[in-house]
Each structure stands twice: as C-alpha cells, then as structure tokens.
Amino acid sequence: MRNIILFLIIGTLITLMLIAGCSAVCATIIILLAKFVNEHILAALPFSVIAGIILSFFFYGKIMKKIMNKYGLNNKK
C-alpha cells in the first residue's frame, strides 16, 4: 500500500513539473516569435498553457511506458 501511495505522489509531482516546463517552453517560443516575427502573435500566449498540458501528457505517457517496461509492471496475467 505504501508503494502505491508513493507512486501516486511521485507521479503527480512529475506531471505538475512537466506541465510547468512544457508551458514555459511554449510561452517562450510564442514570445520569441512575437519579438522576431509579429507582435500580434502574443494573442496566442494563453494557449501556451493548453499546449503545455497536451505536451506534458504525451511526455508523461512516454516516461511511464519506459518505467513500466523497465520494471516489468505491465505483465498481463
């Protein structure tokens, strides 16, 4: 039971860090595009959070798949 709770807590923290990191990267890209291409691109800045959430789910799935394969957690009985 302790391992399950620990896994959920660590998984949640990883998810939150991935969301923050991916959102920051997307916001940085939008700000750089606004600086070099067109200033009106800043209107898309709120969508960087949504893009960050979507990217973090993608990366989280990849990470979990590797961890499950490494530790044999995906064995079907």
Image (spheres, helix red, strand yellow):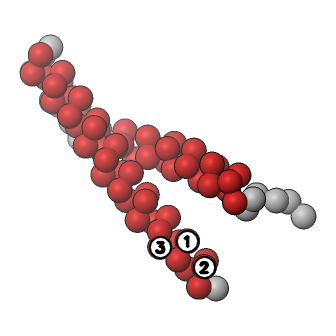
Query: Which quadrant of the rendered structure holds the C terminus?
Result: bottom right
Crowding at mark 2 (Cα within 10 Å: few <14, some 14-19, many 20+): few
Q: Residues within 10 Å of mark 1 (few under 14, many from 20)?
A: few
Q: Position of residue 35 (x, y in %)?
A: 9, 21
Labels 2 and 3: the sequence-earlier one: 2
**Residue count near mark 3 (Cα–Cα under 10 Å), binned few <14, some 14–19, many ≥20:** few
Seen at 55% across and 71% down, the residue is 7
Q: Secondary structure at mark 2?
A: helix
Q: Please give left or right for residue 16 compared with residue 65 in the image.
A: left
Residue type pointed to by label 3:
Ile
Q: Position of residue 15 (x, y in %)?
A: 43, 58
Q: Is residue 50 left or right of residue 1?
A: left
Q: Which residue is mark 1?
A: 7
Circles 1, 2 touching at the beta carbon (< 8 Å):
yes
Quarter of the image for residue 2 reads bottom right
Rendered location of residue 25, percent (x, y): 28, 38
Residue furthest to the bottom: 1
Marker disc for residue 9: 3
In this picture, residue 34 sits left or right of residue 15: left
Q: Look at the numbered disc 3 and give the secondary structure of its residue.
A: helix
Where does residue 51 sit, x and y in percent of width and height? 37, 39
